[in-house]
Image (cartoon, helix red, strand yellow):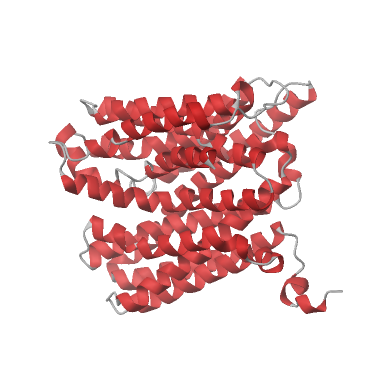
Amino acid sequence: MPALVILLAGQAMATMDQSILAVAAPGLRTDLHATDGQLQLVVAMYTLAFAAFVVIGARLGDVVGRRRAFLAGLGAFTLASLAGGLAPSPAAFIVARAVQGAAAAVMTPQVLSIIQLQFTGELRARAIGAYSLVLAVGVAAGQVVGGLLVGAHLLGDAWRPALLLNAPIGVVVLLAAGRGLPDVARGARRRLDGGGAVLLAASLLALILPLTFGRDAGWPAWVWPCLAGCALGLAAFVGLERRVRARGGDALFDLDLMRVGGVAFGVAAVLLVMGCYAGFLLTLTLHLQDALGFTPLQAGLTFAAYAIGFAVASLTWTRAGAATRDRLPVLGPLLMGAALLALGLVAGGGGWPVAVTLPLLAAAGVGHAWGFSPLANRLTTLARPDQAADLSGLVLTATLVGTSTGVAAFVGVYLSLAPRGSAHALGVTTAVLAGVLVLTAACAACALSWHPSRWLLPWREG
């Protein structure tokens, strides 16, 4: 499936760049003479632009064609990576990162849309498993690759190769996409709802901005008006989209998708499980480095066990029987929560016994994959073909919002308790994570329309 490899290569580039600079902060500060505020913007601007424009990017696939949108996004992403890698000043780097994020928002929604429209049955399920693997593990992989590139000191400024690497890879993927990526039929030509685009982007920025900067700033007073503005903006967006539909225009987002049975609960489960993953990833990284003295690269490599568990489960869950497959989105978060809770208890003694912690990390990765991949596949079967862009934008938005919220919430819990001991803070945080993952399992159960007695006592059917 050459087309799938091309799509996943583009998705991997965009996903890894969310975290590839996380280990390069000291070098960035020294080489660019950046202030703390500029350093925060360099790291955060990518995610801010990505989250603000991803629904708009999804709709552009309907407007100009999904193949053309993917190629345009990939080309802009490659050029912005080159500009960032050569940036002479913090301001230039911040602009390059913003363009990178916006380009990723145009490119990545086309991946799930094309998978939904080009694949069916078992092939779609396998493609969704591979897509989920890239989407989830890419963040941790970005930390590892960033650590390797920064540690290798390939150039005078050690952080530059982390971005410059995208240039040759992007060119190769562009050439391959020009030949091997099919042109997916658009259906009826649609226009971009400019008013809805501006309103939605502003609303999402009002959410992501305080979640990104609020914790480090001590949750100042401006955070709460931003969050209130997000709620008001989203309400206004819904009203605007209804009016656009009523007068026969092309809405930015098809609100009917949220009324399809299971979609709202399924998207909530995606948001929660990705939030738990992102919050745990950074929390454990802080514990390993601050309490146990791991280097950034060692901390990143520790997640290899988690990534292996996720990869094996993502690529093999389609071989399970239909009855088992239907239960995985509920069983997965429960397994992930149990593994994280046990990990917190084991690490509570202040050590890191590898023989115990690595299998627990692998089990958590398996649970995460079970909770994400089969559910994402189920969501693609619920949406109509003409709602492919809407579903893709919705899933990616849930992933990005969940990531930002999870980091703000769970890392906040950990840092508030860290003065009483890092091991204690990790134990409490994993207990909170386990509780949220139980809620995630409940959302998944609602999404799959399971009656509790039917799920718990399947032998009573018939």
User: Is residue 225 in sight in this rendering?
Assistant: no
In the displayed orientation, state which residue is furthest to the right.
Answer: 462
The C terminus sits in image quarter? bottom right
Residue under the point 52% across and 66% down = 367
- For residue 157, above or below residue 68: below
> How far from the left and from the top, in percent, is residue 378?
67, 53
User: Is residue 247 in sight in this rendering?
Assistant: yes
Nearer to the camera, 109 or 319: 319
The N terminus sits in image quarter? top right
Q: Does residue 241 appear left or right of residue 283 in this picture? A: right
Nearer to the camera, 296 or 229: 296
> How far from the left and from the top, in percent, is residue 291?
24, 67
- For residue 104, above or below residue 413: above
- For residue 362, above or below residue 102: below
Quadrant assignment, res 15: top left
Residue under the point 36% across and 51% down = 141
Quadrant assignment, res 459: bottom right
> How far from the left and from the top, in percent, is residue 222?
43, 39
In the displayed orientation, state which residue is furthest to the left.
Answer: 156
Residue under the point 37% across and 53% down = 140
How many numbered discs? Answer: 0
> How far from the left and from the top, in percent, is residue 26?
19, 44
Quadrant assignment, res 327: bottom right
- For residue 60, above or below residue 329: above
Residue under the point 52% across and 63% down = 313
